[in-house]
Image (spheres, rainbow, N blue to C red):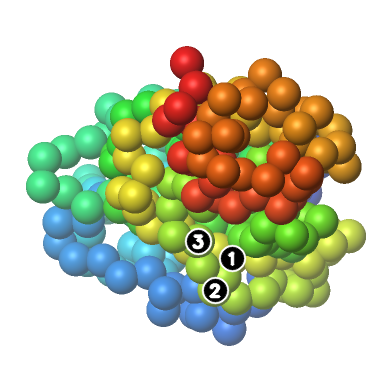
Amino acid sequence: MKQQLSTSSKLPKKSLGQNFIKDENFLLKINNYIRTNHKTIVIEIGPGKGALTKYLAQKYFSKLYLLEKDNLLSLNLIDQYSYNKDIIVKNVDALHFNFKSLIKKEKKIIIIGNLPFNISTQLLYKWLEGNAWPPFYSEMILMFQKEVAERIISKNKNKKYGKLSIIAQSRCKVEKIIKAPRTIFYPKPKIDGMILKFTPIMKYKNIKFNNLQLLLNASFKYRRKKIKTSLKDFKIALDKLNIDKNLRAEDLTVDDYCRLSYLIS
């Protein structure tokens, strides 16, 4: 009990990008989007003081993993859920955690997280990159800063459309679930958040991920240049697909970039 009391007044750490959700109505809304059964493995990233965890713990699941980098908060969670052997707390940095170690046959894995704002895009890349597809998870429900979320869901011909949009949408169906106003957090951040749902798609499962990254790096390095300049090294592939070389990086669709990636070596 002393441990719980000490964390209840614990100040969030800026170095860990901690922003705790304090609005119960908002937590209930998130909880309603999370569908599980007795075969589901749930992974919560950055549970913090356990605001959402208390709802997750009431659901059906095979295992519930709580990945918390903050040592004091993880100790509190261990103490709080010691009664349930299927709730497993790991005092780890999610960026360096081997998620594939949690894979079990015939189990559905859902990743849930109010992601630390300072590493949110790094974590997303970690779960999207590589040539092996489908991934180890079947669904992700994640919170990002609003401006990052808008980049992720943006379509071509939009100034927010870029590498992050294309990589995310080439791998997953991405849906906006709900906005998260800054007032629901403690401490209150400078910008609102947004929760997105990611469901893996198979359309580009055979893509060479390194090729896609190569194209995107070249194309968006100088995004206002026409692709006849930025993608001049890939002229043969552009010609094969009859892509207008007077277009700019943001004009090409996710499908354009993925089809191009198949044609380069």
Callout 2: SS = strand
Q: In the rendered view, tell whether residue 126 sits above or below residue 87.
A: above
**C-alpha distance separating marks 1 and 3:** 10 Å
Q: 44 and 128: which one is in front?
A: 128
Looking at the image, is mark 1 or mark 2 earlier in the sequence? Answer: 2
**Residue situated in front as seen by the camera: 77 or 262:** 262
Q: Secondary structure at mark 1?
A: strand
Across and down, in percent, residue 55 comes to 41, 70
Where is residue 98, by image quadrant?
top left
Measured in 3D between alpha carbons, the distance from the residue under mark 3 to the one under mark 2, in whole angstroms, is 9 Å
Q: Give neighbour class at mark 1: few <14, some 14-19, many 20+ (Cα, 10 Å).
A: many
Q: Residue at x 58, y 83 (%)?
A: 25
The residue that label 2 is drawn on is 177
Name which residue lies at 19% across and 66% down: 37
The secondary structure type at the circle numbered 3 is: strand
Q: Is residue 116 left or right of residue 87?
A: right
Residue 178 appears anywhere in the view = yes
Residue 68, relative to residue 97: is it above or below? below
The crowding category of the residue bearing disc 2, from other C-alpha atoms within 10 Å (few below 14, some 14 to 19, many at least 20), is some
- Which residue type carries mark 1? Ile
Looking at the rendered structure, the kind of residue marked 3 is Val
Density class for disc 3 (Cα within 10 Å; few <14, some 14-19, many ≥20) is many
Q: Dot 1 corresponds to which residue?
A: 195
Q: Could you tell which of marks 1 and 3 lies nearer the N-terminus? A: 3
- Contact, CB < 8 Å: mark 1 with mark 2? yes
Residue for badge 3: 174
